[in-house]
Structures are given as C-alpha cells and as structure tokens.
C-alpha cells in the first residue's frame, strides 16, 4: 500500500497485489481509461472551403459559354436577365482565352464520343433546305438585278450583322472578304441578341444607325440562336404558338425590308443544328420562318447552314471530314457556337453563294 503525495489517498502497488494473493480483489487505477482532451490542430474546414471555391471558379470559367447559352434559351424573366448579366462577362473571357478547347481536350481524353473526329463527313458546302421546309435555300436573284463586279477601285461594301454565331461567322468571313482586295467589309455583332427581345437589344435601331454609315451594297445577317423564347407581354406570347410564329415572321420580314431599304442585297444565313435536341428543334423552326420570309423578298436570299456545319442527314456533329481525310473541328465544346474551323467552312460557303446565287463576281 502506498500513499499519493498530493491527496494522501492510499492505493495498491504491484507488490501489494502479489502479497494479497490471486483471490483478493484489486483495483489498479493505472488501468482505468481516462478521457483525454484533444489539443491538436483545429479542423481544416477553411482549407476545404477554399479548395472548393477554387474548383468552382475553374469549372465556371471552363463552362461559362454553355451556362450563358442555357440562360439565353431559358424562359423570359428576371432569372434569365440576371443569369445573362452574371455569366456573360465570364463567358466572354473564357472564349477570348480559348478555354473551351480545354474542355474539348478533356472530353477526348475521357473518350466521350460526341467530341471525337469522324462523326460528320464532307465539308463541301451543300445548301439543302432545313428539315421543316422543302423550298430551295439559295434563291437566284431576279434578272432585273444587274450582276455586281467589284474591283480595287470600286469595292463591294459589305455589312455583316449577327448574334454570337454571327460573330463566329464574321470573324472568318470579314478577313476572307478583305483578302480579295475588292471588298470593304464591316462586322457588327452583338452577343445574346436577336429579334424577340428588343428591350434587351434593339436590332432595327442598330441597323438604322449602321446603314447610313456603311452604305452597304450587301448585308449578311446571321441571327436567331437566342430567339427561341417567349415574346414579352403583357401578356407574354409563348414560343411556338401560332401567334408567336406570326409575330416572329413579321419581325423577320420587317428587318429584311430595312436591310434592303437602301437598295442593298441581303443574304440571310440560317442557324446550324445544335447538340441540344430541344434547341436544335427551335433552330429548325426559326430557319423555316426565315427562309419563308426570304422567299417573299425580291432582294433577300436565304442560305442554309444545316448541312454545311452538320452531317449530310442534318444532324449535329463537332467534327467534319474534308475530302482529303482531314478532320476539322467545326463546333465549340458547348455544342452551340461555331469553332474557327467551322467558321471558315461557312465563310467559304457564303462566298460561293456570292457567285452562284447573288451574281457577285469575286476573285478566286
């Protein structure tokens, strides 16, 4: 038996237990489990939070173009407007830095079939009608309109208008036209715009400003990617209803009239198929309205891009194959916008339409 120096309480020692014999009950406080107070590093929740925020920012930068277009085609309202305001600047930076190609490369590494070469064929420009219509897509101008033969001293004045896909086209088309040496071309592109939301951007007013400044002989228009939505009310006019179709046709027709008001010829380039089947169906509807209205205007020609940037069957494809077997990336990873390779293919189709349908003689 021993005594605790601090408390004076007696406790058994090992020698005491041995002396007491095997039948004597003993109690060894050294074997009692005493809870310990944990005094290590605090939980690393702050570090985890920062890592999560960093991962979110990286994802947002890479996927911003897709998020932007999802907002563009969402129902009209405050939520859509706020989303566009927040995501728009990030998407612009993402496109400017080419971050979308990082996503494309990762998709290839992960073996995602949708972004692999070989899903489409034949980049030779074709101009069949979009799925909802059977009328010719490139209509010859009436013989009363004289052919245009631009030269170095008498250059053809071209104005290119459009939404973000129109910008994709214009970024390839304008340099190609300037490279002929006989064309003066100007691009006026506005992201996230169209004809259904003049409250967001008023294209007729913009065109009224452009025409006296550029005095174009040819106006090229590519827009509609953002138009598959309701018309604002009150009351709102739901997308796809007969009233909506009538209103949209009127706006398209009026815009065509305005574009040709100073005597210019107008080439309206239709939307390509989209990866999202719902959005692609909307683009087919919008194309059919655009084409029908172009057929009613003497100075307007419609050019379908449905199989120029899609498969021969009119399906979405991120890649096309040239006649010599080269794979060309024609669409951005978001499944909506046009990649530089696709923009160049569409540019050459537009220039071919100059010669074949518009009777504009450009150097080859």
Image: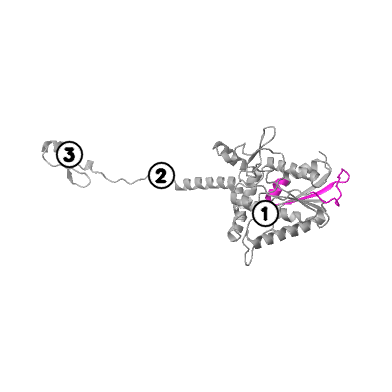
Q: Nearer the viewer, mark 2 or mark 3?
A: 2
In the image, residue 161 lies in the stretch drawn in magenta: yes
Magenta segment: does it hold 220? no
Q: In front: 258, or 110?
A: 258
Distance (Cα) linking label 2 and label 3: 37 Å
* N-terminal-most mark, 2 or 3: 3
Estimate the x, y position of residue 115 in percent, counting from the top left.
59, 40
The residue pinned by badge 2 equals 41
Of 7 and 42, the residue lying toward us: 42
Label 3 environment density (alpha carbons within 10 Å; few <14, some 14–19, many ≥20)? some
Residue shown at the point (18%, 46%) measured from the top left: 9
Mark before the other along the chain sequence, 2 or 1? 2
Question: What is the secondary structure assignment of the residue under circle 1?
Answer: helix
Looking at the rendered image, the quarter that the C terminus falls into is top right
Separation of marks 1 and 3 at Cα, in angstroms: 95 Å
Q: Residue furthest top?
A: 324
Looking at the rendering, the stretch of residues picked out in magenta corresponds to 140-169
**Upstream in the sequence, badge 1 or badge 3?**
3
Residue 246 can be seen in this image: yes
Above or below for 338 versus 251: above
Disc sitting over residue 157 in the figure: none
Residue 331 x/y as whole percent: 64, 43
Q: Quadrant of residue 308?
A: top right
The residue furthest right is 153
Residue under label 1, please give it: 286
Q: Position of residue 314 (x, y in %)?
A: 65, 45
Q: As rendered, which of 32 and 12 lies closer to the eye?
A: 32
Q: Which residue occupies the extreme front position in the image?
A: 134
Percent position of residue 214, x then y = 81, 53
- The residue wearing badge 3 is 13
């Amino acid at each position: 038996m021993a005594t605790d120096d601090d408390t004076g309480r007696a406790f058994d020692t090992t020698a005491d237990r041995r002396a007491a014999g095997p039948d004597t009950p003993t109690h060894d406080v050294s074997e009692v489990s005493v809870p310990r107070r944990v005094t290590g590093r605090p939980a690393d929740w702050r570090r985890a939070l920062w890592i999560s925020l960093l991962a979110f920012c990286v994802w947002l930068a890479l996927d911003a173009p897709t998020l932007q277009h999802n907002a563009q085609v969402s129902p009209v309202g405050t939520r859509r407007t706020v989303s566009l305001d927040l995501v728009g600047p990030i998407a612009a930076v993402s496109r400017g830095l080419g971050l979308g190609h990082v996503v494309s490369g990762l998709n290839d590494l992960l073996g995602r079939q949708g972004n692999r070469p070989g899903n489409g064929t034949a980049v030779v420009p074709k101009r069949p009608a979009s799925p909802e219509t059977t009328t010719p897509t490139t209509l010859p101008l009436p013989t009363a309109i004289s052919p245009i033969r631009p030269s170095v001293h008498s250059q053809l004045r071209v104005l290119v208008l459009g939404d973000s896909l129109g910008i994709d086209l214009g970024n390839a088309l304008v340099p190609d036209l300037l490279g002929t040496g006989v064309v003066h071309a100007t691009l006026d592109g506005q992201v996230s715009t169209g004809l259904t939301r003049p409250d967001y951007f008023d294209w007729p007013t913009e065109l009224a400003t452009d025409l006296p400044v550029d005095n174009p002989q040819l106006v090229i228009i590519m827009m509609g990617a953002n138009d598959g939505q309701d018309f604002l009310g009150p009351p709102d006019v739901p997308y796809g209803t007969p009233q909506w179709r009538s209103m949209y046709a009127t706006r398209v027709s009026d815009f065509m009239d305005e574009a040709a008001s100073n005597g210019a010829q107008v080439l309206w380039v239709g939307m390509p198929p989209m990866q999202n089947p719902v959005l692609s169906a909307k683009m087919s509807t919008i194309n059919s309205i655009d084409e029908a209205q172009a057929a009613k205007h003497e100075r307007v020609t419609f050019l379908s891009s449905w199989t120029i940037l899609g498969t021969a069957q009119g399906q979405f494809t991120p890649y096309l194959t040239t006649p010599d077997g080269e794979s060309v990336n024609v669409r951005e990873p978001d499944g909506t916008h046009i990649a530089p390779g696709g923009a160049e293919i569409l540019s050459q189709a537009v220039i071919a339409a100059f010669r074949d349908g518009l009777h504009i003689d450009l150097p080859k």
